[in-house]
Amino acid sequence: MATQSQWIAGARPRTLPAAVAPVLVGTSIAYWQESIDVGASYFQPTIAILALIVSLALQIGVNFSNDYSDGIRGTDAVRVGPVRLVGQGLAQPKHVKYAAFISYGIGAIAGLLMVLLSHYYLLIPVGIAAIISAWFYTGGKNPYGYAGWGEVFVFTFFGLVAVIGTFAAQTKQITLPSILGAVVCGALSTAILVVNNLRDIPGDTQSGKKTLAVRLGENHTRLFYYLCIAIAFGTAAYLGKICGGPKIALLVLLPAFEAIKPISIVKSKAKGPELIPALAGTGRLLLALAIVLSAAISLSR
């Protein structure tokens, strides 16, 4: 029977910045948009909080789903990294599956409340698609995460959908700044998955899991990681310039110092467990950039 601390570890709290960051960015852009649309009142804290609950619930749900699906397939047997409840025999598979479904249920309820408050009903099919995609990432007979499409899922749902959805629920529109903010979060969230899969290349190769990292190989995966970070900061600078001019564009680049350590680890040809600090560092980088970008955009209103 898994302990409480093991269940918490199984939820993979280090991945939660990928859930928090897009809500911060989407909400700050909604707040800034009020200065563009004179007389508008977009910023809605209740909707923002519900969006955060949805994002966190889906992130935790997909983490438990992956734990369950990978565990019953035996693909966790040769992996390194955080606690795996099923793969390490710490919890019964059905209990981990229930935890995933409970998380999705919480996200669905919070999402429905958000839609009822915002009257932005387009989010209903989007939310359903997010839950289905989260489950079939590693679940079902042909999980697309095993075929190299995981990065597309992360960029889409923890970038485009999360930021634009948060923004649109408050403003009922989609704008260029909201799209740019989505690219920032999506690129760094993708970078988290890239370094995670880089770490797991040996085990995934052995278990037949053809992630994008397995398909690209170590060297090209490392280059892809650098590209994700470059896209995130380049887009953030452009977004800052649109919202507040050159000074804001420079301000949002300050978290680049946080990128030095994870980049240096990846560049050092680190492998396996040696990449875990880079994984944690990329999560911190995402959260730092989201906080600074959100503050800069809000202040430039």
Image (cartoon, rainbow, N blue to C red):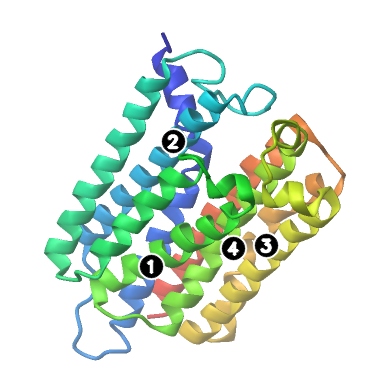
Mark 3 or mark 2, earlier in chain: 2
Q: In the image, is 42 to the left or to the right of 234? A: left
**Residue toward you, 95 or 187:** 95
Kindly report which numbered mark, 3 or 2, lies closer to the viewer in this rendering: 2
| Residue 193 point in image, percent of width and height | 61, 48
- Provide the residue designation for mark 3: 229
Mark 1 or mark 4, earlier in chain: 1
Q: Label for residue 26?
A: 1
Q: Are marks 4 and 3 in contact (CB under 8 Å)?
A: yes
- Provide the residue designation for mark 4: 187
Q: Are marks 1 and 3 in contact (CB under 8 Å)?
A: no
Q: What residue type is labelled 3?
A: Ile
Q: What residue type is labelled 4?
A: Ala
- Dividing the image into 4 quarters, which one contains the N terminus? top left
**On screen, residue 109 above or below 165:** above
Q: State the separation of the CA atoms marked 4 and 2.
A: 23 Å
**Mark 4 secondary-structure assignment:** helix
| Residue 48 point in image, percent of width and height | 27, 59
Mark 4 or mark 3, earlier in chain: 4
Q: Which amino acid does label 1 sit on?
A: Gly
Q: Do the residues labelled 3 and 2 touch (CB within 8 Å)?
A: no
Tell me which residue sits at (32%, 27%) in the image: 98
- Dividing the image into 4 quarters, which one contains the C terminus? bottom left
**Mark 2 secondary-structure assignment:** helix
Q: Residues within 10 Å of mark 4 (few under 14, many from 20)?
A: many
